[in-house]
Image (cartoon, rainbow, N blue to C red):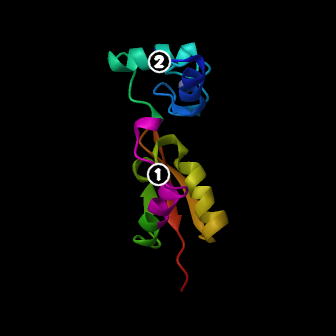
Amino acid sequence: MRTASEASESVRGRRLCPGCGGSFQPCRENQQHCRPSCRQKHYERRKGLLPSLPWDAPPAGPGTFRDRLAAYFRQRPNVWIDGLELGKVGGGYAWRTRKSECCRQLGMRIVNRQRKVGRVTVSEYRYEAEG
Ligand SMILES: [Zn+2]
């Protein structure tokens, strides 16, 4: 039989919430999730009701997409590249932020132009390499 002090001992350590992926301090011995909504989320994910969430992705260091984008531009100096293509490299919709980071943090000069192809406006970007 467990004593009250043993029970509180096992509660003391922090646990990893399988719902949100964060660590939390349980207040009950059998508490597995930090919030009821996390318990629900965890349950739904196990049943495949929710798409995989960001914390399922392998940890990406800060600047990973920025560096990928920067490398992509550097391999294509002075070439116009379709914005859609850059979205694939630089992480979907956030790639414009990554592009700004290339300019601000890496000092790269990247220019934009828009042109009409039929009825579609194509947005293109070019890395202005020195020399
Ligand atoms: Zn949680």
**62 drawn magenta:** yes
The front one of 43 and 54 is 43
Rate crowding at label 1 as few (under 14), some (14 to 19) or many (20 or more) other CA atoms within 10 Å. few
Mark 2 is on which residue type?
Answer: Lys
Total marks drawn? 2
Q: Position of residue 130 (x, y in %)?
A: 55, 82
Mark 1 is on which residue type?
Answer: Ala
Above or below 69: residue 2: above
Ligand 1 closer than 8 Å to the CB at disc 2? yes
Q: Position of residue 97 (x, y in %)?
A: 60, 50
Q: Secondary structure at mark 1?
A: loop
Q: Which mark is residue 92?
A: none
Tell me the residue that label 2 is attached to. Answer: 41
Q: Secondary structure at mark 2?
A: helix
Q: Residue furthest bottom?
A: 131
| Quadrant housing the N terminus | top left
Side of 44 relative to 10 (left or right): left
Rate crowding at label 2 as few (under 14), some (14 to 19) or many (20 or more) other CA atoms within 10 Å. some
Q: Quadrant of ligand 1?
A: top right
Q: Which residues are magenta?
A: 55-70
Above or below 20: residue 95: below
Q: Position of residue 95 (x, y in %)?
A: 52, 49
Q: Residue at x 48, y 24 (%)?
A: 19
Q: Residue at x 42, y 64 (%)?
A: 72
